[in-house]
Amino acid sequence: MAIATTMRPLVSLTLPDRGAARLATQLFLALAGTLLLTLSAKTKVLLGPVDISLQTLAVLLIASAFGLRLAVATLLLYLAEGAFGWPVFQGTPEKGIGVAYMLGSTGGYLAGFVVMAAIAGWAADRGWDRNPFKLLGAMLTGEIVMMAMGFAWLAVLIGPEKSWQFGVLPFIVGDLIKVALAASLVPAVWALLKRG
């Protein structure tokens, strides 16, 4: 007998089994996710020499709660909103809007958010969201890939040395805190649900 390799992420507890109600609920959750991403992008935390948003935390929480498919769909919808010119990103509208903004210094990080969501969502689909250590490993992997994509794109624009100095180094501590927080929150929610 084959053992199922997937488990259901947190969001599955609220989804209808099938039909139009399921699709409507998924659409609502994706739109709510883009709103959370926008709010997290606009929320700034002063930690050292740069402002840090809560966006990495939001991406990881959405991915862990939604699972791979819905998380990636939510991130793609968020990027589409930004490409359409909606001021959903951290530096919009002050530093531009639309595709021009997306091709600027944050372009690699924005694309990296989709990959990070896919990695954390994949882990949640396999039940890793119930174990803080497994989830932490998946989230750290997603974080590293996202930062590497951001670094690579920024290096094309301003060179590798400045990309490391301004695009990676100032964010390491803050992002590690956000990864650890996300990796502990989601399993805590599962533990509370088991008790209830």
Image (spheres, helix red, strand yellow):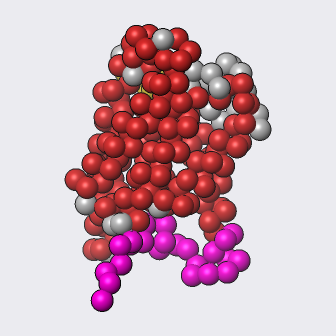
Which residue: 71% across, 77% down? 20
Where is residue 84? Give x, y as percent. 77, 38
Which residue: 50% across, 38% down? 112
Q: Is residue 57 at all visible to an observer of this figure?
A: yes
Where is residue 77? Give x, y as percent. 66, 49
Q: Quadrant of the N terminus?
A: bottom left
Q: Looking at the picture, does residue 180 appear above or below residue 52?
A: below
Where is residue 148? Give x, y as percent. 41, 30
Residue 183: within the magenta? no
Q: Residue furthest right?
A: 84
Task: Report the span colored magenta.
Answer: 1-24
Residue 4: within the magenta? yes
Which residue: 65% across, 29% down? 102
- Judged left or right of residue 42, residue 50 is left
Q: Is residue 188 at all visible to an observer of this figure?
A: no
- Judged left or right of residue 62, residue 4 is left
Q: Quadrant of the C terminus?
A: bottom left
Q: Residue furthest bottom?
A: 1
Where is residue 48? Give x, y as percent. 36, 16
Which residue: 72% across, 36% down? 83
Q: Looking at the picture, does residue 125 appear above or below residue 94?
A: below
